[in-house]
């Protein structure tokens, strides 16, 4: 058999080692190491009421939870699936509760607790307002009318707790003609111009391949929450409005400025660059036995181009007048890409990356999840670690992009089972009696399990 393993190199890049023993290849399992749990996190002592759904809001509250805040996820008792972004559940053990094993829920539900409240009832709203009195932040991503429909607009929250921070993440903002319209990420991608810019020059606009809009809005919401908490000692509580559309406009600012200054509409360019070549993603030899393998290469300077030529070792390309300068390479980028693709498809993308990086050429293998979880850079830094989930087992959870030396903030706990913390929260935080909790459960104002509708 052929065992594929990974080792680190002096340059910090991963290098594949093939140990041949004959037969079919066997891939090592991705190893997830449980995260260490520090005692001191930056937001210890802060409590957040998380009313968010989908992706953008949970990105914010997950980060706040990892930073140390106690995040109480407020769920509806009949929330199945738990998020519109739900996908097929993980395999797991224990009772048949697929809503506890959704991949997106496990990714964006960690570092939180879960309670189920029926906010359409007077008793459920009263429980929520009791929690507001004892909390620091309310974070939601409803359309602007929803909190008012619940009777939980700013005045109601502030009356119970003048120090509360209310963070709202409507799709288009709380004013303007689109105020009450709703949208998920693809709609924001379209409205912001991101989809217009995504795709190939001879093709239609495309949805970006991941949750750019949601991730950007979530990170902005977490930052603005921390800013409001820092200012609270001077100004008290306040509202924070984060329109998802305006968040994504930050990502297309160069296109807007270019149109304003030149009068020309920006065009789709695929993987190409507006002024440099070669710049793209090129076919490569199999990575982990996957024939659909690629390598990203970008040369923006003559030094980087010369480094590429040194590794390429093609005298015809090196002496071709069409590629003698950066401008000429850009003008003839289609032919350059064709020739480069013929060369790269003969090489292992990880090994070729190593050689190009040693020559000063920005290059990276294009990795899928299987390769990424086995990459030595990711493994060494524990970029993705594990959290023990009672129904999933050791569940993968990526760290935040930053590392704090004195107050580390890795993911805190695996995503909670649905409503598992309802009774503990009512007892520990609100001090409710056993009799009152039983009354709330029987009336349907709260729940400690999923309710079928």
Image: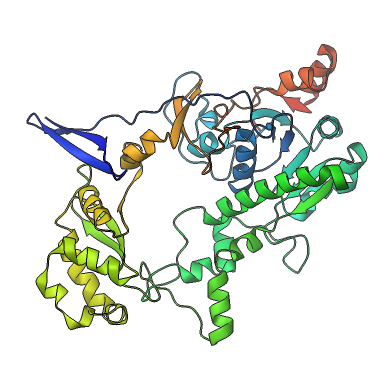
The quarter holding residue 120 reads top right
Residue 185 location (% of width, % of height): 57, 56
Query: Is residue 36 toward the left or the right of residue 275 in the image?
Result: right
Q: Nearer the viewer, residue 239 or 433?
A: 239
Q: Outermost residue, bottom direction? A: 263
Q: Outermost residue, top direction? A: 434
Q: Outermost residue, right direction? A: 159
Q: Which colour assignment does the render follow?
A: rainbow
Query: Is residue 61 toward the left or the right of residue 340 in the image?
Result: right
Residue 408 location (% of width, % of height): 57, 32
Query: From the viewer's perspective, is residue 419 above or below residue 15?
Result: above
Is residue 451 visible in the rendered image? The answer is no
Q: Residue at x 16, y 54 (%)?
A: 347
How many discs mark residues in the rendered view?
Answer: 0
Q: Nearer the viewer, residue 353 or 268?
A: 353
Residue 332 location (% of width, % of height): 26, 80
Query: From the viewer's perspective, is residue 38 above or below residue 315?
Result: above
Image quadrant where one finds the N terminus = top left
Is residue 357 visible in the rendered image? The answer is yes
Query: From the viewer's perspective, is residue 85 above or below residue 122?
Result: below
The quarter holding residue 407 reads top right
Q: Residue at x 82, y 34 (%)?
A: 132
Query: Is residue 40 toward the left or the right of residue 104 in the image?
Result: right
Residue 444 location (% of width, % of height): 77, 27
Image quadrant where one finds the C terminus = top right
Q: Nearer the viewer, residue 264 or 321?
A: 321
Q: Nearer the viewer, residue 12 or 237?
A: 12
């Amino acid at each position: 058999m052929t065992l594929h393993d990974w080792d680190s190199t002096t340059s910090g890049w991963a290098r594949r080692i093939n140990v041949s023993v004959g037969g079919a290849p066997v891939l090592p399992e991705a190893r997830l190491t449980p995260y260490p749990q520090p005692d001191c996190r930056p937001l210890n002592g802060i409590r957040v009421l998380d009313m968010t759904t989908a992706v953008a809001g949970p990105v914010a509250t997950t980060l706040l939870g990892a930073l140390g805040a106690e995040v109480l996820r407020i769920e509806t008792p009949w929330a199945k699936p738990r998020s519109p972004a739900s996908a097929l559940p993980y395999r797991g053990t224990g009772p048949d509760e697929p809503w506890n094993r959704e991949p997106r829920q496990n990714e964006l539900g960690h570092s939180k607790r879960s309670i189920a409240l029926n906010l359409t009832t007077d008793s459920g709203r009263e429980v929520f307002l009791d929690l507001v009195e004892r909390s620091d932040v309310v974070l939601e991503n409803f359309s602007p009318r929803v909190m008012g429909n619940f009777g939980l607009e700013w005045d109601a929250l502030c009356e119970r707790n003048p120090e509360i921070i209310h963070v709202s993440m409507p799709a288009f903002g709380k004013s303007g003609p689109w105020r009450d319209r709703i949208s998920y990420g693809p709609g924001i991608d379209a409205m912001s111009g991101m989809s217009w810019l995504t795709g190939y020059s001879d093709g239609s606009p495309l949805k970006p391949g991941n949750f750019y809009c949601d991730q950007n809005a979530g990170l902005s919401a977490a930052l603005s929450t921390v800013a409001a908490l820092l200012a609270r000692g001077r100004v008290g509580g306040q509202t924070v409005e984060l329109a998802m559309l305006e968040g994504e406009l930050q990502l297309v600012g160069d296109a807007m400025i270019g149109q304003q200054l030149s009068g020309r509409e920006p065009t789709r360019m695929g993987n190409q660059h507006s002024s440099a070549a070669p710049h793209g993603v090129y076919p490569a030899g199999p990575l982990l036995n996957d024939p659909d393998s690629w390598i990203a290469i970008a040369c923006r300077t003559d030094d980087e181009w010369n480094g590429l030529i040194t590794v390429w070792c093609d005298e015809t390309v090196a002496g071709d007048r069409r590629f003698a300068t950066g401008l000429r390479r850009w003008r003839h980028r289609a032919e350059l890409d064709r020739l480069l693709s013929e060369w790269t498809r003969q090489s292992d993308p990880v090994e070729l990356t190593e050689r190009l990086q040693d020559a000063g050429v920005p290059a990276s293998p294009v990795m899928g999840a299987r390769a990424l979880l086995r990459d030595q850079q990711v493994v060494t830094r524990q970029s993705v670690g594990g959290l023990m989930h009672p129904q999933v087992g050791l569940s993968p959870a990526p760290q935040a992009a930053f590392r704090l030396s004195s107050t580390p903030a890795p993911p805190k706990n695996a995503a909670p089972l649905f409503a598992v913390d309802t009774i503990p929260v009512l007892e520990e935080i609100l001090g409710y009696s056993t009799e009152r909790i039983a009354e709330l459960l029987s009336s349907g104002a709260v729940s400690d399990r999923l309710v079928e509708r």
